[in-house]
Amino acid sequence: MQTELLASPNYYNTWNGLQSCEPNVPQDPRYWSRADVATWLNHMASVHHLPAVPNDRFIMNGKALCLMTVAMFLDRVPLGGKLLYKDFQLRLAKAMYLSDMYRSLEAERRVGPRAGELLRCCTRLRGAQRRSKMHLK
């Protein structure tokens, strides 16, 4: 059932810009309040035709969601937990990427193009190191 949800055309349409109504929450999930988390959960349930997610299972802000594993999502929402986890991780990755790009542009503006290039190189290196550590586990 989880695989069917991930294969749903609605899931990918939200990331391709075809889904016009996004939840009214900050773009960076790390800054979500409890109310923002509830809004996101309700949005995901309606877009993907999931059963309603009881808000008492996610009494937390966005920073707490960042610490959750896929198993923790599945414990709280057996039907749709993997989809919620994947959507949240994609939103977080997008926000972190945009944050890094913004810092790089700011460095270029302040110091010059070489500083921004160096910052982008360091960011890519950190990402590669994290991925290699994950593969070793």
Image (spheres, helix red, strand yellow):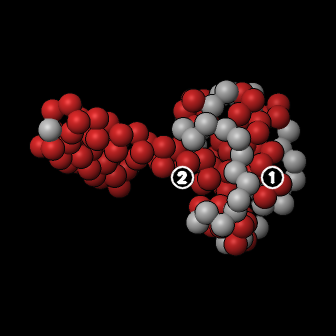
Q: Nearer the viewer, residue 51 or 90?
A: 90
Q: Position of residue 119 (x, y in %)?
A: 21, 41
Cα–Cα span, label 2 and label 1? 17 Å
Q: Is residue 120 above or below residue 16?
A: above
Q: As drawn, is 63 to the left or to the right of 114?
A: right
Q: Residue at x 63, y 31 (%)?
A: 32
- Mark 2 secondary-structure assignment: helix
Q: Position of residue 75 (x, y in %)?
A: 73, 44
Q: Which mark is residue 45?
A: 1
Q: Position of residue 85 (x, y in %)?
A: 63, 49
Crowdedness near tag 1: few (<14), some (14–19) or many (≥20) residues, C-alpha within 10 Å: some
Q: Nearer the viewer, residue 38 or 109?
A: 109
Crowdedness near tag 2: few (<14), some (14–19) or many (≥20) residues, C-alpha within 10 Å: few
Q: Amino acid at mark 2?
A: Leu
Q: Amino acid at mark 1?
A: Ala
Q: Is residue 38 above or below residue 47?
A: above
Q: Residue at x 72, y 46 (%)?
A: 23
Question: Where is residue 7, by image quadrant?
Answer: bottom right
Q: Which mark is residue 119?
A: none
Evaluate whether residue 129 shows in this view.
no
Number of numbered discs overlaid on the protein picture: 2
Q: Residue at x 54, y 38 (%)?
A: 28
Q: Position of residue 52 (x, y in %)?
A: 87, 48
Evaluate whether residue 45 shows in this view.
yes
Q: As drawn, is 30 to the left or to the right of 80?
A: left
Q: Earlier in the sequence, mark 2 or mark 1?
A: 1
Q: Residue at x 82, y 34 (%)?
A: 55
Question: Where is residue 118, by image quadrant?
Answer: top left
Q: Residue furthest front?
A: 109
Q: As drawn, is 29 to the left or to the right of 81?
A: left
Residue of label 2: 90
